[in-house]
């Protein structure tokens, strides 16, 4: 039995026979193909002349029932900003119904009760599904660092006779069926510029670089194909280069996708990736009443419809930010990230912005809320960040930094490096450091304090987070953004912060110091900056350990910060010994 005959048999199983033309319309096949399939199904004893199924036909259907489903719901859904800070994508409401609830009910209608939902971000909000629908929640602890290939790996044992379903779909018609004869992957008949597959004449999905059929993401895997895909998923997950891969990578074999194409009309299944897509689908959705959107409306005396082109920006280490347009002008809104309410005093931050207002040091701030940290700034056209490997960029940024420091601005609070080291350690809630020699390293860093204090200059407003990514260059202009940690401190701390974020080695750090001091840097000052490199390395290492407990990993950055603490302590002691 070929796939065309299987499709016709599946349609006949769903209701009464109403004629070849209706079958052609529902199946998408030509009238000639439908007639040929009916004749073959009748001759082989699966279908009667009136289109009803014989006992053999019923038996064949019983052998091809889907058994289970996997719903993927672990990711951040970053493109859903600003909604994703409050609600995971799977729980968005469309026409009064949550996406996840609708998908599960549609699976139930097809007889699927064994449903596993892979969760991660805001996983607690999915807990109600256990009692309401009897699903199993499977936690993917790597959701923040790895893509959904690793979510599928968590449920790979369930992939036989299984539907795999993204959580962010609104299906106007039930895409799940009581019988499936072959593996398929669902695409739209409409093209999409970012699609990497196209349906060929044999209904196979072949890879393309662009402009393929829009990938919807629902997939069905038979028992045999499910076992093959399960093995490939696990093998791919063992390769660290695949950390950012989508699970569809495991579907390719011999130059095409293992499953056949299941093509549906455009609009039958709607993927909701952005705030604006949700607004277009359901302008009355409760999730559209969002704090961030409400803030923008108040600041600019605008309506939600005036807010367009919402685009997520690269997720920062501390915050989530998104770009938006309001009445033809572009802005950036910052939404504080996980745990930042414990790390940053937003009232102090607001005071800093008050101190530097109108000095052309930072981006133009239209709004900052000292209570929740929401901030709206103008988008700088054609700006780029400093390239720490570009000597000219570095010299320009150091000249800017020194000019700022020489203004000798003051605010009512300071940044205490050693106090912050202790503070971040307290946030570990009694958990030991992941580093076996942490106590010894900390003692060594504390021993540097007398030298640092003896050689510190006047404490003035210091940025503290003066890293390459926070310098925006537009032609001859430079702006320094993100003043969250700023406070009074020895300004030379900013040099050390730039260096350790850029992951500079000692030679590069010396070059950086020379760029800040073109007239020459005194030896004692250079040694002091080495001390700051060591102390700030431990500071941000402790910060990374706290964020790690929140499920946020920073890879090499975290390890390198700890190495700065140890290595530059030794460098300082060796240099100090030589001078003695």
Image (spheres, grey):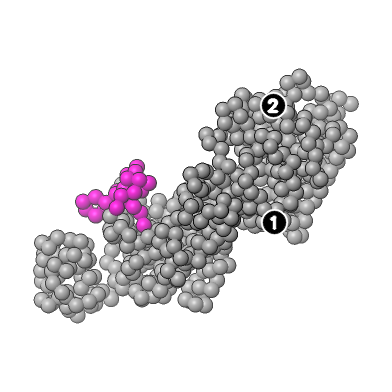
Q: What residue does disc 2 label?
A: 399
Q: Position of residue 402 (x, y in %)?
A: 73, 29
Dot 1, how many residues are within 10 Å of its Cα: few (below 14), some (14-19), or many (20+)? Answer: few
The quarter of the rendered structure image containing the N terminus is bottom left
Is residue 213 one of those drawn in magenta? Answer: yes
Helix, strand or loop at label 1? It is loop
Which segment is the magenta one? 190-216
Mark 1 → mark 2, Cα distance in angstroms = 34 Å
Q: Position of residue 377 (x, y in %)?
A: 60, 44
Q: What residue does disc 1 label?
A: 371
Helix, strand or loop at label 2? It is helix
- Residue 254 seen anywhere in this rendered image of the structure: no
* Residue situated furthest front in the rendering: 301
Is residue 191 one of those drawn in magenta? Answer: yes
Q: Residue at x 53, y 73 (%)?
A: 128
Q: Quadrant of residue 188?
A: bottom left
Q: Is residue 435 left or right of residue 117?
A: right
Instruction: Give the mark, 1 or 2, whose residue is nearer the N terminus.
Output: 1
**In the displayed structure, would residue 226 be above or below residue 576?**
below
């Amino acid at each position: 039995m070929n796939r065309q005959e299987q499709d016709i048999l599946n349609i006949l199983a769903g209701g009464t026979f109403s004629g070849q033309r209706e079958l052609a319309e529902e199946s998408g096949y030509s009238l000639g193909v439908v007639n040929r399939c009916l004749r073959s199904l009748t001759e082989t004893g699966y279908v009667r002349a009136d289109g009803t199924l014989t006992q053999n036909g019923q038996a064949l259907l019983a052998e091809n029932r889907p058994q289970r489903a996997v719903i993927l719901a672990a990711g951040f859904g970053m493109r859903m900003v600003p909604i994703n800070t409050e609600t995971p994508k799977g729980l968005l409401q469309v026409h009064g119904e949550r996406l996840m609830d609708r998908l599960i009910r549609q699976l139930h209608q097809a007889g699927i009760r064994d449903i596993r939902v892979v969760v991660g971000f805001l996983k607690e909000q999915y807990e109600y599904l256990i009692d309401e629908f009897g699903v199993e929640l499977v936690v993917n602890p790597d959701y923040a660092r790895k893509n959904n290939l690793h979510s599928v790996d968590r449920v790979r044992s369930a992939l036989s006779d299984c539907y795999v379903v993204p959580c962010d779909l609104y299906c106007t018609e039930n895409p799940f069926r009581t019988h499936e004869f072959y593996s398929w992957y669902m695409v739209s008949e409409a093209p999409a510029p970012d699609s990497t597959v196209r349906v060929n004449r044999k209904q196979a999905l072949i890879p393309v670089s662009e402009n393929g059929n829009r990938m919807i993401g629902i997939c069905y895997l038979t028992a045999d194909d499910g076992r093959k895909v399960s093995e490939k998923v696990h093998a791919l997950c063992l390769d660290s280069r695949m950390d950012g891969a989508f699970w569809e990578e495991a579907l390719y074999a011999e130059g095409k996708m293992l499953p056949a194409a299941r093509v549906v009309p455009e609009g039958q299944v709607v993927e909701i990736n952005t705030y604006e897509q949700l607004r277009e689908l359901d302008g009355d959705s409760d999730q559209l009443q969002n704090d961030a959107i409400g803030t923008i409306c108040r600041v600019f005396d605008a309506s939600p419809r005036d807010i367009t082109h919402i685009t997520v920006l690269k997720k920062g280490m501390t915050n989530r930010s998104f770009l938006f347009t309001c009445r033809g002008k572009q802005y950036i809104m910052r939404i504080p990230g996980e745990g930042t309410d414990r790390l940053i005093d937003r009232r102090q931050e607001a005071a800093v912005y008050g101190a530097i207002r109108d000095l052309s040091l930072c981006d133009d701030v239209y709004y900052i809320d000292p209570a929740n940290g929401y901030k709206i700034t103008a988008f700088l056209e054609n700006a780029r960040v400093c390239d720490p490997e570009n000597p000219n960029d570095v010299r320009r940024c150091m000249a800017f930094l020194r000019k700022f420091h020489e203004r000798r601005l003051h605010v009512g609070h300071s940044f205490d490096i050693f106090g912050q080291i202790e503070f971040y350690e307290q946030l570990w809630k009694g958990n030991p450091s992941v580093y076996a020699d942490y106590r010894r390293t900390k003692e060594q860093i504390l021993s540097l304090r007398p030298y640092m204090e003896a050689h510190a200059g006047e404490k003035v407003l210091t940025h503290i987070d003066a890293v390459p990514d926070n310098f925006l260059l537009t032609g001859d202009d430079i702006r320094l953004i993100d003043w969250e940690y700023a406070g009074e401190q020895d300004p030379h701390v900013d040099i050390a912060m730039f260096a350790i974020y850029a992951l500079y080695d000692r030679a590069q750090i010396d070059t950086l110091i020379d760029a800040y001091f073109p007239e020459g840097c005194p030896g004692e000052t250079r040694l002091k900056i080495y001390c700051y490199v060591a102390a700030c390395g431990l500071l941000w290492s402790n910060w990374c350990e706290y964020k790690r407990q929140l499920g946020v990993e920073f890879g090499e950055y975290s390890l390198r910060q700890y190495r700065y603490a140890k290595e530059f302590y030794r460098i300082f002691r060796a240099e100090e010994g030589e001078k003695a």
